[in-house]
Amino acid sequence: MRDFSRPGRSPVYAANAAVATSHPLSTLAAIEVLRSGGNAVDAAIAAVAVQGVVDPLMTGIGGDCFALYAPAGAAVPVALNGSGRSPAAAEDSWYLERGLTIGPTSPHAVTVPGAVAAWAHLVERYGTRPLGELLAPAIACAEDGYPVQPRVAFDWARNVARVAGDPAAAAAYLVDGRAPGVGTIMRHPALAATLRRIATEGPRGFYEGPVAEDIVARLRELGGLHSLDDFAGAAPETVTPITTRYRGYDVYECPPSGQGLAALMMLNVLTHSDVGALSELDRVHLFAEACKQAYHHRDALFADPVLARVPVEHLLSDAWHASARGAIDMARAQEPVIWPEVAHKDTVYLCVVDRDGNAISLINSIFQGFGSGILAPESGVLLHNRGFSFRVEPGHPNTIGPRKRPMHTIIPGMLMRDGRAVAPFGVMGGHYQAMGHVELLTGLIDRGLDVQEALDAPRSFAYGGGIELEPGFSPDLAAGLMARGHAVRPEAGPIGGGQVIWIDHAAGTLAAGSDPRKDGSALGY
């Protein structure tokens, strides 16, 4: 139990249903759907649609979506890959012949956005309310206006340059050339009209007709290879989730093209260590070494499994994690393996459990802050830059190719035990997300933290040749890590964000937590 004499948050306990998101208006939209009788999927889609309006630099209909859904009574969750594909004309030879690389604001970084198709699929297959009804709160926010929240304003100000370079984006997202301040009311009428079209016509209203024509015209104007056929063919894919067993729990992740496999690999490395009994120094060191092992393989091997072979079974095998454990020296950091990389990315995550016990773990992203910074001017659709993860390197599994999905960092998680969902969970933060899943789960399972304590705990991340440390660790941790050979980088800002809902089947209650690094909240009834 937390010290009530100090600032902090308590977990939210509920008897019927609970939701946790990173924005208060998203949480409110979800709880209203739940209280009116909607189920977890209905609430999640209402919430993520709102967040795509009120937190535009993190997510939106111009981005991608992944989900794990555990219907009550299901022994295994359903996994949905709602990420988009590159244009049919995107041969890597085309880029090589022209000496092109894929920059973050390039039209070539824009794959066909998959979020709308994923939302529609989830609602049609598992929801109880019409998609149009669930989009109504988002439409109201875009049309009537919403106040900019403090963390949103903080991130908005840091990413002004991304939208300043596109006239349409600057007009939509800047006020007199500057980021809006906290409490500023923002409206997006063009986006509201597009959401209304989707509400009326379903996903065809996005992937066909005027909206698709507007997006394709803007991308081709900038040199993109996109076609209307690329958009008309967009569809999510139901995939088989991957899993490992950790301390008696079954941890489920979406398979590649996401990076959830890396989280499972790290948990397998940790399973023979008493993480809860380790000192802070030993724990952070062990996490760093396991992280380097898993991320080395992620960067070399993870890609779209439809077009590249990803050796999932080998990477989850006893042989692999025995080899990885054998390479870890608890007294000394190993030399890091540096791969070409991109900076941390922006995403939103949310989870919902309804009164019937259905649980959904959903994540939606436009990748970097404001994505590509490219706004389709008539439709108000801000486009992601997920294709920035592609390489232009023939023979590499993640090289760009026709109708191919890039390796994704966004990963929802689902914890289960004895064939029942125990906790939908997720951690935002780009590359950190796989490590974030490990830190969150070991906090809950090994260290005995409650859901809010596990989210509040300071974070570390070993990537790119050093360890980032949030404030909150003991003062002598950095010195101890450096003595073991780590390059320590104290992190100026927060690392990621997250949400989790713990289902206590014995007590008949839900405990929900929302990350203090964001503006969001957990609510239940």
Image (cartoon, helix red, strand yellow):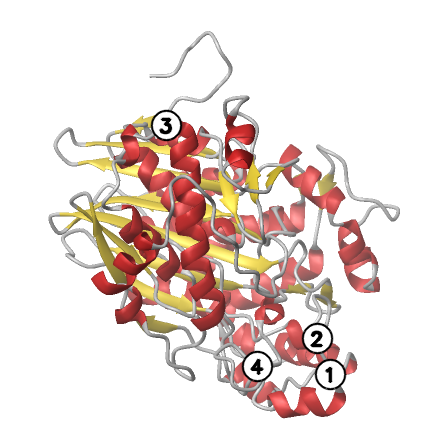
Label 2: few (<14), some (14–19) or many (≥20) C-alpha neighbours in 10 Å: many
Residue 451 drawn at (x, y percent) = 34, 31
Q: Earlier in the sequence, mark 3 or mark 4?
A: 3
Residue under pointer 4:
400
Residue under pointer 3:
279
Residue 174 drawn at (x, y percent) = 80, 49
Residue under pointer 1:
220
Left or right? Give the position of 193 relative to 518.
right
Given this view, does label 4 or label 2 mark the residue nearer the observer?
4
Name the foreground residue: 308 vs 107: 308
* Spatial separation of the CA atoms under disc 2 and disc 3: 48 Å
Q: Earlier in the sequence, mark 3 or mark 1?
A: 1
Q: Earlier in the sequence, mark 2 or mark 1?
A: 2
Q: Amino acid at mark 2?
A: Pro
- Helix, strand or loop status at disc 3: loop
Left or right? Give the position of 476 relative to 350.
right
* Spatial separation of the CA atoms under disc 4 and disc 2: 13 Å
Label 3: few (<14), some (14–19) or many (≥20) C-alpha neighbours in 10 Å: few
Check if mark 2's residue and mark 3's residue have beta carbons within 8 Å.
no
Q: Quadrant of residue 94?
A: bottom right
Q: Earlier in the sequence, mark 4 or mark 2?
A: 2
**Residue 39 visible at all:** no
Which dot marks residue 107?
A: 2
Q: Amino acid at mark 4?
A: Ile
Given this view, does label 3 or label 1 mark the residue nearer the observer?
3
**Residue 137 visible at all:** yes
